[in-house]
Amino acid sequence: MKRYGKFAALIVLIIGTLVWLAVGGIQETKTYYKTVAELGGMGENAYDNRLRVAGDVQDGSIQRKGREVSFALRQEKLTLRVVYNNIEPLTDTFRDGAQAVCDGKMGRDGVFRATRIQAKCASKYEAKPGQKPAVQKQT
Amino acid sequence: MENIGALALLLAFCLAVYAILGSLIGKWKSKAFLVLSAERAVYSVWFLLTLSAGLLVYSLLTNDFRLSYVAGHVNRDMPWIYKFTAWWGGQEGSLLLWTWILSCYCALVVFQNRRKFRDMMPYVTATLMVTQAFFLCLITFPLSPFQVLAVGREIMAVPDGNGLNPLLQYWAMAIHPPTLYLGYVGFIVPFAFAMGSLITRQPGDAWIHTTRRWALVTWLFQSCGVLLGAGWAYAVLGWGGYWGWDPVENASLLPWITGTAFLHSVMMQEKKGMMKVWNMVLISSTFFLCILGTMLTRSGIVSSVHAFAQSPIGKYFAIFLAAHIAVVVYLILDRLEYLKSESQLESVVSRESSFLFNNLLLLASCFAVLWGTLFPVISEAVTGEKISVDAPFYNRVNVPIGLFLMLLTGVGPLIAWRRSSLDSLKRAFLWPTVAGLATIGILMGLGIRHFYALISFGLCVFVTWTVIAEFFKGAIAIGAKTGQNLAAAMVELTHRNTRRYGGYIVHLAIVFMFIGFSGAAFNLDKTIEVKPGESFRLGAWDLKVKDLQQGENPNYRWGHLVVDAWKNGAYVATLKPEKRSYRAARTDTTEVAIRRRLNEDLYINFAGVGEDGRPVVQAYVFPLVSWIWVGFVTLIFGTLICLVPSKVRLQFPKTKVLGVVTQDAPVPR
């Protein structure tokens, strides 16, 4: 059994190291998905963690001031003001009515500071022209 | 037309169900004619699917905008080649492609084995057809590609379609999905044979011998699919990366990892009769991960930048997967005695052990990727909070695993079976180790301090050295015997044992890719707003934006920047990053300008126009990234060599356990 002891020790060592790395990685990069409604109820927690909020860009709310872009993110009936101030320009899919996923942190002033915004046009992949057939569900 | 297509799908579904029942009942009641008719049903399914796929393609090419799929993915001005590739540009069409490829494979398998494995084949056919019926059910009922646009009871056509997503109008993206599917779907065949062999309680490894080629070809397609996707992301998306650990990318990587582990661990079964249960588990997991991958990309369970629209098919997949897992677990547990290992591990320093650790690491990497991908789903189920993890998590776990695997790539093939003496280790590894360490020393002398990059380059040299030494040793021995020159002797050597030397070439390909990956430690980037006429610096490069030109054609409007690139004061090239605005899809895309060289790529993206009308330019320098594509080509070459039959028929001597002698047992006379 001594033979297998060596194997077991090595395996435990490898798995242990990897688990340690993985746990560190999760702690470092975890991002909480929140709805706009939940953000309000988070209290202090809202300011410390990395958050991800998804919603639709409210029509006509996009304001550009130099490099800074601010807009209102709408989810159901609630809206959240988001400010994005990064040198990387937003993709072309970012426009009125687009679905946007914003990563960033909540500011104390109630404005969400996004460090990354992914936007996709609501109909980007499964676009239907003109009349939508009743069977098709759009999200 | 659409009625014929939909009818063909419905008929194919019925025939697939018939094939399952026919082969199972035929086997159970020993009725050969039922088994035979089930096999004919497999051919008919292929015919019907080919027909309906043909009809869909015909509708796409002839702009039949009454069909919702055609209207959603094609427009009149698109080049015909992209009209054809629109077949897999959307949900329904790509499921049809998946199913069609599966039916091709099934027909091929049934034809190849029409006179072989008569007791096992009915189960193989049934296993294949269960999956076939499942996918046919999806495209017949909830997601028919032949859905017509209708208002009330009136069928109506739209004047022009939406066009294919412009991002997909690129050569690598045109062939990426079919290649990936050829890989995804192909793993079903070894899985079906594994199940057939398990159900009929075959003691041997006939299933491994017959499906080795399948597994290898499938693995090749899967590799190509993954790498084409990476190449597309790099050349088209404009963010300068080739891999972002997005759920959809992970989905394609997962079966590749377990497939790679499988290709290695079957050698243990062939040569030593070990790891039989493990191989069953591996091939089943690979198949499950293929299905899971399809489920992730098709159902929108995990949110991703490029996952397809949400759809209700997630639960179908979940049921399908759960049922399969239950059956496989039951079968393996029930038939454990047929899967007993014929020999044992003897030493930590042995070929067996290196295979073991290779598998362990690949599985750990697979598990980490799977865990990260499903983390939002898991965390939501456990804590009620949806939490996602990001690229750094994957890198932290997978970079050390990758480096360790690299080490094994060098060590494994040279180490002896059973156990290795210190002396033989020294003989095999002294010079490669010296070379590897010397590389690290030189690079440190040049001022490189990045820890992982240093280790990686050292290991690359180590592995390359061992592989080349193997070729030279073998070739010199053959040359001495036959009098051939070195080059001819090398060809002869490779031809004598294509699996081994082809495998070495694939290992070299992996080395090349690691060189490319390591280059990422030295990437440079800059995003800047510049007026035409201005210039800026990036590393050793001076980039001068000369002009902004604009124009249009029927498919899109374009504008491109003319950028002169100077390196160390000398003019090198003119690059033209472009921005396009597609008319039909009403979307903008960027066409990145890349100057590819083996030492570094210069990558310029015309990102957009700033508030005051000044163009925003993203410029990157990616050292060594081209080696990934060099590795890609080498990988294809090496795998093809593995597929060439060896000139010398190899007999693997197996260690057989004839009996166990214990001290107090009487010795038989």
Image: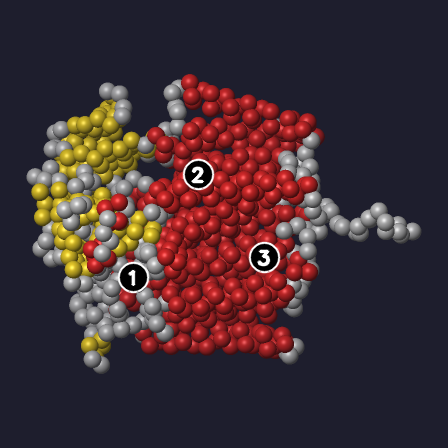
Could you tell me residue B1's position as x and y percent? Answer: 32, 74
Residue drawn 44% across the image and 74% down it: B13
Given the image, on which type of amino acid does mark 3 rest?
Answer: Met
Report x, y in % for residue B259.
Answer: 51, 51
- The extreme top residue here reads B445
**Marks 1 & 2 on one chain:** yes
Tell me the kind of residue under disc 2: Val
**Residue B210 in sight:** no
Instruction: Give yes or no for contact between labels 1 and 3 (Cβ–Cβ under 8 Å).
Output: no
What residue sits right under mark 1 in the picture? B309
Whether residue B569 is visible here, answered yes or no, is yes
Image disc number at residue B490: none
Q: CA distance from mark 1 to mark 2?
A: 32 Å
Have a look at marks 3 and 2 and say if they share a chain: yes
Q: What SS does tag 3 mark?
A: helix
What is the residue that sits farthest to the right in this orientation? Answer: B669
Q: Residue at x 55, y 46 (%)?
A: B359
Q: Between marks 1 and 3, how big is the CA–CA gap?
A: 34 Å
Compute the Cα span from label 3 to label 2: 28 Å
Residue B23 falls in image quadrant:
bottom right
Which residue lies at the image location 35% right of the left edge and 62% below the top edge? B299
How many neighbours does mark 2 have within 10 angstroms: few (below 14), some (14-19), or many (20 or more)? Answer: some
Considering only order in the chain, which callout, 2 or 3, is on the residue closer to the N terminus? 3
Q: Which residue is mark 3?
A: B280
Callout 3: residue from which chain? Answer: B
